[in-house]
């Protein structure tokens, strides 16, 4: 059993900034149904969705999603 990622206050700030600027990062199940255990990570910028091919379990998702939020925050925050 793994431990799910707990976001920091800075993580929440970066996520909020991204959401306010039309950048969304979210998991998408690999398979339909309640038994799904793996997810793709999708990134949507200005309503254009792109999903990666890598698959992650629920314990990996949070950390990776917040790494993407940090990437987009650092890349675009100064430009807005």
Image (spheres, rainbow, N blue to C red):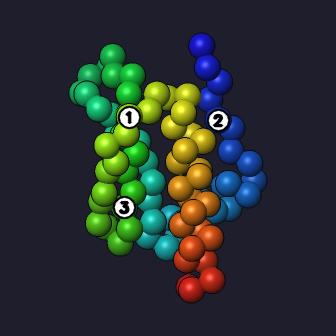
Where in the figure is residue 53, as x and y percent of width and height?
Answer: 31, 43
Q: Secondary structure at mark 3?
A: strand
The local crowd at label 1, few if under 14, some if 14 to 19, many if 20 or more residues have their Cα within 10 Å, is some
User: Can you say whether 42 is above or below 36 in the image?
Assistant: below
Which mark is first along the chain, 2 or 3?
2
Distance, label 3 to label 2, CA atoms, is 22 Å
Locate residue 43: give its quadrant.
Answer: bottom left
Distance, label 3 to label 1, CA atoms, is 17 Å
- The disc at residue 18 is none
The local crowd at label 2, few if under 14, some if 14 to 19, many if 20 or more residues have their Cα within 10 Å, is some
Q: Are marks 3 and 1 in contact (CB under 8 Å)?
A: no
Does 40 sit left or right of 65 as displayed? Answer: left
What residue does disc 1 label? 55
If the image is split into quadrants, where does the C terminus sit? bottom right
Q: Is residue 45 visible?
A: yes
Mark 2 or mark 1, whichever is nearer to me: 1
Distance, label 2 to label 1, CA atoms, is 17 Å
If the image is split into quadrants, where does the N terminus sit? top right
**At 51% from the left edge and 37% from the top edge, which residue is drawn?**
61
Where in the figure is residue 25, as x and y percent of width and height?
Answer: 45, 54
User: Can you say whether 80 is above or below 13 in the image?
Assistant: below
Which mark is first along the chain, 1 or 3?
3
- The disc at residue 44 is 3
Locate residue 73: give its quadrant.
Answer: bottom right
**At 40% from the left edge and 45% from the top edge, which residue is drawn?**
41
Q: Secondary structure at mark 1?
A: loop
The local crowd at label 3, few if under 14, some if 14 to 19, many if 20 or more residues have their Cα within 10 Å, is some
Locate residue 44: give its quadrant.
Answer: bottom left
Q: Is residue 17 visible?
A: no
**At 38% from the left edge and 28% from the top edge, which residue is drawn?**
38
User: Can you say whether 31 is above or below 80 in the image?
Assistant: above
Does 40 sit left or right of 5 as displayed? Answer: left
């Amino acid at each position: 059993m793994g431990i799910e990622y707990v976001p920091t206050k800075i993580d929440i700030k970066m996520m909020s900034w991204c959401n306010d600027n039309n950048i969304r990062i979210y998991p998408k199940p690999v398979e339909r149904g309640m038994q799904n255990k793996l997810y793709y990570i999708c990134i949507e910028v200005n309503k254009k969705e792109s999903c990666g091919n890598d698959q992650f379990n629920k314990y990996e998702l949070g950390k990776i999603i917040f790494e993407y939020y940090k990437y987009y925050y650092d890349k675009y925050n100064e430009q807005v």
